[in-house]
Every structure is written in structure tokens, then in C-alpha cells.
Amino acid sequence: MKRKSKKADTVKVHGMFRLNLLENGKIVGDSGWRSNVITDLGFDQYICQTLLGMAGSKKITYMGIGTGTAPTSAQTSLDGELASRVTIATNTVASHTAQCAASFSSSVFSSQGPKTIDNIGLWNTSSGGTMFAGSTFASSQWNTNQDLVATYQIRFS
């Protein structure tokens, strides 16, 4: 019997983010869109387990930034993470993209002085927890008179 060829359904997941430094409401720094690494536990707990409604599944609710290197797929935390994660606003874009947005106020670290930021990540909790995804970008000086606005997208194609 001759088999008919079938086109298999495939889904690719691609994460990306963009950071903007704002001074008096004007953009003074822009990372451009950058790719990320979705961690092994990110795929398991945030995508697979959530799709199945399993106990222990997680959803993205916080974003953090840091001063360290890019996370690996097995990593659960962000190198050099700064103290305060912020809650995110979420929406979907064109039905295939989950988008997270966050703002980090300059007042968060003003008592500590300027920071050289290098990485970003998404989590389920305000501290500790399991990292969904993260990456590094060209170092930026975050001054105490600047706010940081971040947009993170997870695209399914």
C-alpha cells in the first residue's frame, strides 16, 4: 500500500527582547531586538506542564535585570541579578506572540549609584523561583536619572 505524505505540524519557539533607557521621557539607549535562551525548566514548567494543566506548572509574572553573563539552557538564575524584579504587563500580539513589558524606575537603585547592566530574565516569582528565559546584551550604563523599559516577546511559529 502506498503511503500519502503528510505535512507534520511543527511549532518553533523564539524569544526576543528589547531594552530602552529613558531620560526625561526620551530614549537615550536602545538595545535593539535581541534573541534569548529559553531554559530547559522554562520549556518544561512554563510551556509543557502549563499546556497540560499540571501541578507545578508556572507562568511568567516577573522580569529582572543583572550585571552578569548570558544564562545557559540549564541555568535557573541570572548572573549578577540586581535586587528588585518587577511585575510585568502581558498581552498577545497577532495570536502567535506572548508579550511581556516592564518598567524599572531610576529610583530603584538610586541609592546604589549607576549600574552597568548586561542581562535580563523572566521568572514566576519576585525572588528565587525558576527562570523561564534570559539573555545578555551589549553593556549599558544605567544612570540614576534614567528609567529602563523592557519588552520581551515569545513567538510561536
Image (cartoon, rainbow, N blue to C red):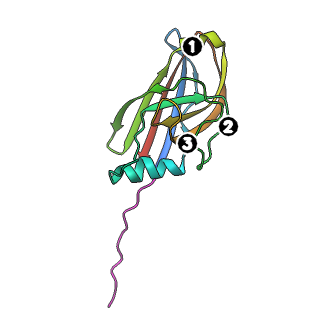
| For residue 30, above or below residue 39 | above
The kind of residue on which mark 1 rests is Gln
Q: Where is residue 106, by image quadrant?
A: top right
2 or 3: mark nearer the eye: 2
Label 1 to label 2, Cα distance in Å?
23 Å
Label 3 to label 1, Cα distance in Å?
24 Å
Main secondary-structure element of the magenta-colored stretch: loop
Give the residue pinned by disc 3. 36
Residue 90 seen in this snapshot: yes
Whichever of callouts 2 and 3 sits on the residue coming sooner in the sequence is 3
Quarter holding the N terminus?
bottom left
Q: Secondary structure at mark 2?
A: loop
Q: Where is residue 95, by image quadrant?
A: top left
The kind of residue on which mark 3 rests is Asn
Report if residue 42 lies within the magenta region: no
| For residue 86, above or below residue 42 | above
Magenta-colored span: 1-12
Return the residue nearer the eye: 127 or 87. 127
124 vs 21, left or right, is left
Residue sitting at x 35%, y 52%: 54
107 vs 60, left or right, is right
Q: Residues within 10 Å of mark 3 (few under 14, many from 20)?
A: many
Whichever of callouts 1 and 2 sits on the residue coming sooner in the sequence is 2
Give the residue pinned by disc 1. 146
Picture coordinates of residue 44 (x, y %)?
Answer: 46, 52
